[in-house]
Image (cartoon, helix red, strand yellow):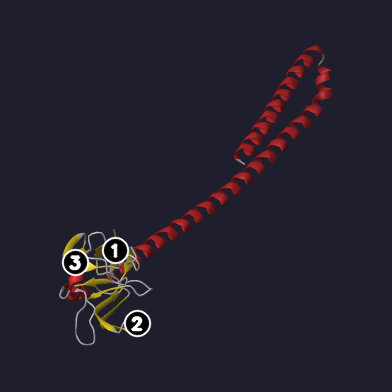
Amino acid sequence: MWFQNKNTNQKKKSSIYLFSASVLILFSILTLAYRADPKVVEVTKDKLEETKNNYVNYFAKEIEKQIEREKEALENKEKLEQKKKEIEEWRKKEAERKKKEEEARKKRAGKGKYIDIDISSQTLRCYYNGKAVLGPYKVSTGKVSMPTPYGTFRVLSKTRRAYSRRYGLYMPYWMQFTSRGHGIHELPEWPSGYKEGANHLGRRVSHGCVRLGIGPAKKVYYWSPVGTIVKVHW
């Protein structure tokens, strides 16, 4: 569009220059004619006046058109500036919204807390603002046929003493971190009170959950509010 306007303006300028040159040439011819025969000037005087009027009217119209174009351009510029302001305002609001969401997320996650579970070393650590504050604790993650999923999750719910109807045993200090039922908990406890798997800590033997020993499970449970990030990796 800019190139089109530029070409149009150049054409108009060229036509103006040509018209001006024609007028100058006409004046030169009249001057020569007057020297040869003054009557010629009288004969062409009306024509010259008409030409001058046409010249003035033409440029008057061109000036009016130019004024209209500049007025339209100014209006478009004002609209563009208004749109820029609206976009900038939206960006500020969006940045503020994201900032509040991030602050709320950190608050829900315990202000920089996260649980780190290393499947390769079968250990669990708790971090606060990048510093390990609990652990490392030995764990038992899922066996090969029922692996613990790896990725980044959050503590979805907590139950002081959960019960598994599927296996018929208790899972003290239960903290669920996937929608499929994976969680962190103390060694499974049978109704008789027997704790299973103490000698398995440090090996992958669970049905997908992350088992902690007696003591560490309680510490991690009370340290981690709902929303705390859980990172499971190799």
| Helix, strand or loop under label 2 | loop
What residue did someone put label 3 on? 138
Q: Position of residue 201 (x, y in %)?
A: 20, 69
Assign a secondary structure to mark 3: strand
- Quadrant of image for the N terminus: top right
* Tag 1 secondary structure: strand
Of the 4 image quadrants, the one containing the C terminus is bottom left
Given the image, on which type of amino acid does mark 1 rest?
Answer: Lys
Q: CA distance from mark 2 to mark 1?
A: 26 Å
Q: Earlier in the sequence, mark 2 or mark 1?
A: 2
**Tag 2–tag 1 contact (CB < 8 Å):** no
Residue beneath disc 1: 231
Report the residue marked by disc 2: 166
Residue located 19% across and 85% down the image: 193
Q: Residues within 10 Å of mark 2 (few under 14, many from 20)?
A: few
At which x and y percent is residue 73? 58, 47
Q: Amino acid under label 2?
A: Arg
Whole-percent x, y for residue 184 in the image: 26, 73
Which one is closest to the eye, mark 2 or mark 1? 2
First of labels 1, 3 by sequence position: 3
Residue drawn at (61%, 37%), measured in percent from left and top? 3
Quarter residue 70 falls in = top right
Label 1 to label 3: alpha-carbon separation: 16 Å
**In the shown orientation, is residue 35 left or right of residue 141?**
right
Query: What's the distance in space between the residues labelled 3 and 2, CA to CA?
Result: 25 Å
Depth check, mark 1 against mark 3: the one in front is 3
Extreme top residue here?
36
Give above or below for 63 relative to 108. above
